[in-house]
Image (cartoon, rainbow, N blue to C red):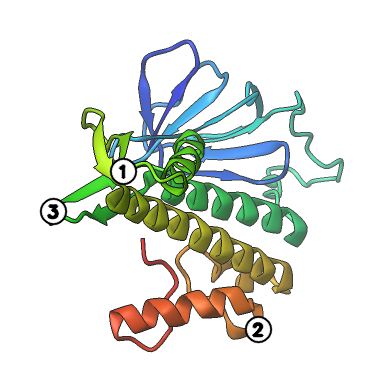
Amino acid sequence: MEKIKIKGTDQLYEIIEIQPMTDAVLRIVFPGIVPAAWGDITLYTAGGVEATTLIGYDTVYREEGRTVYLSNDGSVYTAPETPEGPGDPPEPYVPTLDELRVAKRREVAAECERIIYAGVNVNLADGSVEHYSLTIEDQLNLFGKQIQVSAGQSQIEYHADGQPCRYYTAADMQAIIQAAMWHVSYHTTYCNAINMWIAGVGTAEELQAVFYGADVPLEYQSDVLKAYLTEIAALAGGDGNVADPA
């Protein structure tokens, strides 16, 4: 189960779901304890890996038991001014399709970023397999290593996750760079196709079928994505209907 931590505290809170509802409103569903105070929110994966930090969500927009809506612009929920009969419960808020699209795009972008940053395993010339994270800093670092390889350096310093820095041969360094760049490029292309799909759906029900890892319908697949899927299928011996090789 994913967890969050509020800035200025050390306590981790388990969550069932965290989802943007609009550009300014975020919904969090808790299975148990709900924080008493709010601030910047750091999100951790089920495996305990820090995924991202959401800035400015320090205002309670609306609270429904263990479901909390937060805003990052200071806004709070105002119930519609409609006459209600005695004892009639308030109507639940129903987001518009555009609001749902915004939330879905953010959900997809966050998952794409998480998978890219998680990195890749690379088979090296000696038969070993090492893992390399691919945060923005890692990607920039590897860009610099590509310059070293292109300059003809035979030994290039780098390190795998959790390992000390060591010298790699130019061939191993090139293998790491190629695997990393393929990983980043594929997921960026796939995420773009998902966003085209989100823009094309016409109902909230259709939008529910969209998630990161789903097979993108052909009409939303770019030529670049089709080429990637053909390459993946050839390597896997499949039929090309592949969405996420990570």
Q: Residues within 10 Å of mark 1 (few under 14, many from 20)?
A: few
* Residue 244 falls in image quadrant: bottom left
* Residue 239 falls in image quadrant: bottom left
Near-viewer residue (126 or 189): 126
Residue named by callout 1: 154
Mark 2–mark 3 Cα distance, whole angstroms, equals 43 Å
Question: Looking at the picture, which amino acid does disc 3 mark?
Answer: Asp
Near-viewer residue (126 or 40): 126
Q: Is residue 38 above or below residue 129?
A: above
Q: Of the residues tagged 3 and 1, which is closer to the observer? A: 1
SS assignment at label 2: helix
Question: Looking at the picture, which amino acid does disc 2 mark?
Answer: Glu
Between disc 3 and disc 1, whose residue precedes? 3
User: Is there a contact, CB below 8 Å, between mark 2 and mark 3?
Assistant: no
- Identified at 45% across, 33% down, the residue is 43
Near-viewer residue (91 or 116): 116
Dividing the image into 4 quarters, which one contains the C terminus? Answer: bottom left
Q: Position of residue 120 (x, y in %)?
A: 33, 52
Q: Is residue 237 above or below residue 211?
A: below
Between disc 2 and disc 1, whose residue precedes? 1
Residue named by callout 2: 219
